[in-house]
C-alpha cells in the first residue's frame, strides 16, 4: 500500500462522525451565535440588530424570573442527587445481602424515558385521583395540590428529577468506591478511626474525581431539563416550573422570534460553560486528589 | 462491621428499593385495572379483575401501533449507524497517530457541552434546509454520532495490541478489512454495551423527534405520549397502558444486559 493512502486512512475512518458533528453540532452552534444578533420572524429576511436581543433579554423581567427558577431547580437537584446517589452507593458497597437485587431496583427509574416518568408521576400525584393524596387523607392530613400549587409543584419536580437519576449516578459512585484501595481503611482502623472519620478523611477525599464528574453531569442535565417538565407540569401552574430551555422553545416555535430565542440559547450555553469551568477550577485548587 | 448495623443497612436498603420501584409498579398495576376501577376511591392496590382492556382500547383508538413501529425503526437504524461510525472513529483515534488526532478527540468530548437544547433554533433550520424535516432520517442520522460511543470504543481499542493489526497488514489485508474483520470482533464487549446504550437513548429520545417531526403519522412513541398528555381531557386508561408498553422494551433489555449497563456507565462516567 502506498504511503499516501496509509496517511489518509485514519482521516477516512473519522470522516463520517466528524461530518455529522460539523453539520449538526458545530455549524448550528456558530449559526445560532450569528442568529442571536439578528431579528428574524422566519417569514421575512433576517435583519442585523447588533446586541438588541441581548439587551432586551437582560432587561426583561420574565427572563430573570425564568433564570431564577432554573437556578433554584438546578441548585436543589444537584446536591440532592449527589447525596442520594452517594448514599445508595455506600449502602451497596457494604457487603450486605441482596445487594445486586437492590442495585437493579435502584436503577430501574434511570431506564425509563423522561416522558414516561412524567406521565407516571402525574398519575401518582393527581389532585383528586392520585394515590399520594389518598394516602395523606387516610393518615388524617389534607390533600395537597401537588401540580396546582406553585411551590409544591417546584418541590415535586425536583423530587422526581432526583428519583429518576439517582440510580444512574449511584453506579458511577459505586465504581469510584470500588477503586479505593482497602489498605487505607485498614490503616485507619488500626489507628482507631471511627466509621464516620473514615468517611470524611478517606472516602470523600479519594472520591473527588468521581464527585466532580457527578456534579458536572447532573448540573448540565438539570440546566437542560425539558422533557420531564413538559409532560409532568407543562411548565405550570402558570409559569411556576417554566425553565430556560422551555422558554427558549416557546420564543422560537410558538412566538416565532428566532433571533431572541437564539440569544437566549447563547446565554444558556455561557451559563453552562461558566459553571463547568468554575467546578473544575474549585476542584483543581482543592489539592491533588487526582492520583 | 457488626451484625446489627449490617441488618440495619439491609433493612434500609430494602425500604429504599421500594421507594424506587413502587411508583413504577403502581403505574403498571393501574394499567391492568378496568375503566372505572382506576379512579376508584379508596383505590385498590391489586386490580380486582386484571385485564387488557386498556391496552386493546388504546391500540384500537389511535395509531399507537404505528408509533411503536416508528420508534423501533428509528432506534434500530440509528443504533446500527452509531455502531459503524463510532467504531470507525474510535478505531482511528485509538490506533493511528495522525495530525489532528488529539484535537478531534477533544472536540468530540467538548461537544457534550453543546447539547441539543442550546441549538434548537439552528438545528431546526439546518434539518429543514437539508430536506430532513418531517423525515424519520432526520431523527436517525444526527443523533447517531454520539461522543460517548466514540469515547468508549477508543478507550477499549487502545487495549488491543497493535501486533494483531500489523500481522494482518503483512498478510496483505486492506485497511477496511483489518477494521471490519479483525478489530470489530475483538471489540465485541464494548460494542455490546454501546448497542444497548444507543438503543435506550434513541428509544427514550423525546427532543429530537419533537423538533424534527411535524405530522402525527411519523411520531415516535415518546412524542405520541407527550402529545396525548397535552390534550384537554386526559384518557388515563389508554395513557397508562401505552406508557407501560413504552417501558417494556427497556425493562427487557435491562434484565438481559444488566451487567453491561453497569460496566458501561462506570467506564463512561469515571474516565471523562
Image: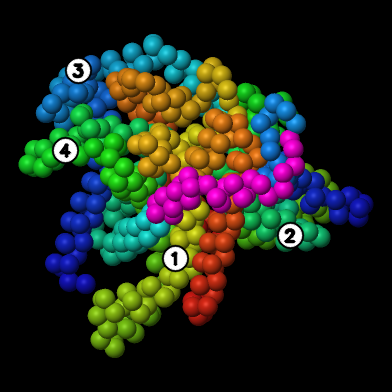
- Provide the major secondary structure of the magenta segment: helix
Q: Position of residue B108 (x, y in %)?
A: 66, 53
- How far apart marks 2 and 4 lie (CA) works out to 57 Å
> Which residue lies at the image location 65% right of the left edge and 26% below the top edge?
B133
Number of the front mark, 3 or 4: 4
**Residue at image coords 15%, 28%:** B43
For marks 4 and 1, the one nearer the N-term is 4
- Choose between A28 and B225: the one closer to the eye: A28
Tell me the chain of label 1: A
Q: Nearer the viewer, residue A265 or B191?
A: A265
Q: Is residue B268 left or right of residue A179?
A: right
Q: Which residue was labeled with disc 1?
A: A211
Mark 2 — on which chain does it sit? B
* Pointer 2 residue: B103
Q: Nearer the viewer, mark 3 or mark 1?
A: 3
Secondary structure under tag 1 reads helix
Q: Position of residue A282 (x, y in %)?
A: 51, 72
Among the 4 quarters of the image, the one containing residue B34: top left
- Give residue A143's mark: 4
Stretch of the chain drawn in magenta: A46-73
* Image spot of residue B205 (x, y percent): 51, 36
Disc marking residue B26: none
Circle 3 residue: B36
Residue found at the very far bottom of the displayed protein: A191
Q: Is residue A171 above or below residue B35?
A: below
Give yes or no for contact between labels 3 and 1 (Cβ–Cβ under 8 Å): no
Is A177 left, or right, of B102 in this rendering? left
In this view, the mark in front (4 or 1)? 4
Q: CA distance from mark 4 to mark 1?
A: 38 Å
Callout 3: chain: B
Amino acid at each position: 500500500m502506498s504511503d499516501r493512502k496509509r496517511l489518509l486512512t485514519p482521516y477516512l475512518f473519522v470522516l463520517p462522525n466528524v461530518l455529522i458533528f460539523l453539520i449538526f453540532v458545530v455549524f448550528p452552534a456558530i449559526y445560532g451565535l450569528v442568529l442571536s444578533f439578528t431579528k428574524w420572524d422566519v417569514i421575512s429576511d433576517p435583519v442585523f440588530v447588533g446586541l438588541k436581543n441581548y439587551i432586551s433579554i437582560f432587561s426583561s423581567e420574565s427572563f430573570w424570573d425564568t433564570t431564577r427558577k432554573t437556578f433554584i431547580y438546578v441548585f436543589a437537584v444537584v446536591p440532592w442527587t449527589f447525596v442520594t446517589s452517594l448514599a445508595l452507593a455506600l449502602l451497596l458497597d457494604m457487603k450486605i445481602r441482596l445487594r445486586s437485587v437492590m442495585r437493579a431496583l435502584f436503577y430501574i427509574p434511570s431506564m425509563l424515558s423522561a416522558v414516561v416518568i412524567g406521565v407516571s408521576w402525574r398519575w401518582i400525584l393527581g389532585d383528586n385521583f392520585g394515590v399520594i393524596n389518598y394516602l395523606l387523607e387516610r393518615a388524617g392530613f389534607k390533600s395537597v395540590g401537588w401540580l396546582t400549587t406553585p411551590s409544591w409543584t417546584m418541590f415535586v419536580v425536583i423530587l422526581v428529577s432526583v428519583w429518576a437519576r439517582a440510580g444512574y449516578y449511584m453506579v458511577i459512585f459505586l465504581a469510584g468506591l470500588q477503586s479505593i484501595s482497602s489498605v487505607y481503611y485498614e490503616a485507619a482502623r488500626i489507628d482507631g478511626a471511627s466509621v464516620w472519620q473514615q468517611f470524611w478523611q478517606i472516602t470523600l477525599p479519594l472520591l473527588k474525581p468521581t464527585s466532580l464528574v457527578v456534579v458536572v453531569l447532573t448540573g448540565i442535565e438539570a440546566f437542560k431539563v425539558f422533557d420531564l417538565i413538559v409532560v409532568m407540569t407543562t411548565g405550570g401552574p402558570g409559569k411556576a416550573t417554566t425553565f430556560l430551555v422551555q422558554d427558549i422553545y416557546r420564543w422560537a416555535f410558538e412566538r416565532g422570534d428566532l433571533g431572541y430565542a437564539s440569544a437566549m440559547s447563547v446565554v444558556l450555553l455561557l451559563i453552562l460553560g461558566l459553571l463547568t469551568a468554575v467546578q473544575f477550577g474549585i476542584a483543581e485548587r482543592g489539592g491533588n486528589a487526582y492520583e | 462491621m457488626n451484625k446489627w448495623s449490617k441488618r440495619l443497612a439491609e433493612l434500609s436498603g430494602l425500604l429504599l428499593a421500594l421507594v424506587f420501584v413502587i411508583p413504577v409498579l403502581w403505574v403498571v398495576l393501574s394499567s391492568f385495572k378496568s375503566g372505572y376501577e382506576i379512579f376508584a376511591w379508596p383505590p385498590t392496590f391489586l386490580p380486582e379483575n386484571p385485564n387488557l382492556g386498556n391496552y386493546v382500547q388504546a391500540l384500537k383508538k389511535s395509531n399507537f401501533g404505528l408509533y411503536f413501529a416508528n420508534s423501533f425503526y428509528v432506534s434500530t437504524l440509528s443504533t446500527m449507524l452509531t455502531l459503524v461510525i463510532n467504531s470507525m472513529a474510535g478505531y482511528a483515534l485509538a490506533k493511528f497517530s495522525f495530525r489532528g488526532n488529539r484535537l478531534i478527540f477533544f472536540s468530540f468530548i467538548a461537544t457534550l457541552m453543546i447539547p441539543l437544547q442550546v441549538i434548537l433554533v439552528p438545528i431546526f433550520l439546518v434539518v429543514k434546509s437539508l430536506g430532513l424535516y418531517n423525515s424519520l432520517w432526520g431523527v436517525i442520522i444526527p443523533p447517531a454520532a454520539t461522543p460517548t460511543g466514540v469515547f468508549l470504543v477508543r478507550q477499549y481499542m487502545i487495549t488491543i495490541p497493535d501486533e494483531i493489526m500489523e500481522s494482518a497488514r503483512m498478510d496483505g489485508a486492506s485497511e477496511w478489512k483489518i477494521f471490519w474483520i479483525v478489530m470489530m470482533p475483538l471489540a465485541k464487549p464494548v460494542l455490546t454495551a454501546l448497542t444497548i446504550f444507543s438503543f435506550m437513548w434513541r428509544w427514550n429520545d423525546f427532543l429530537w423527534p419533537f423538533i424534527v417531526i411535524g405530522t402525527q403519522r411519523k411520531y415516535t412513541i415518546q412524542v405520541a405520549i407527550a402529545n396525548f398528555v397535552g390534550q384537554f381531557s386526559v384518557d388515563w386508561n389508554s395513557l397508562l397502558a401505552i406508557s407501560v408498553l413504552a417501558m417494556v422494551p427497556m425493562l427487557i433489555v435491562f434484565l438481559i444486559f444488566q451487567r453491561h449497563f453497569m460496566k458501561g456507565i462506570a467506564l463512561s462516567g469515571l474516565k471523562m
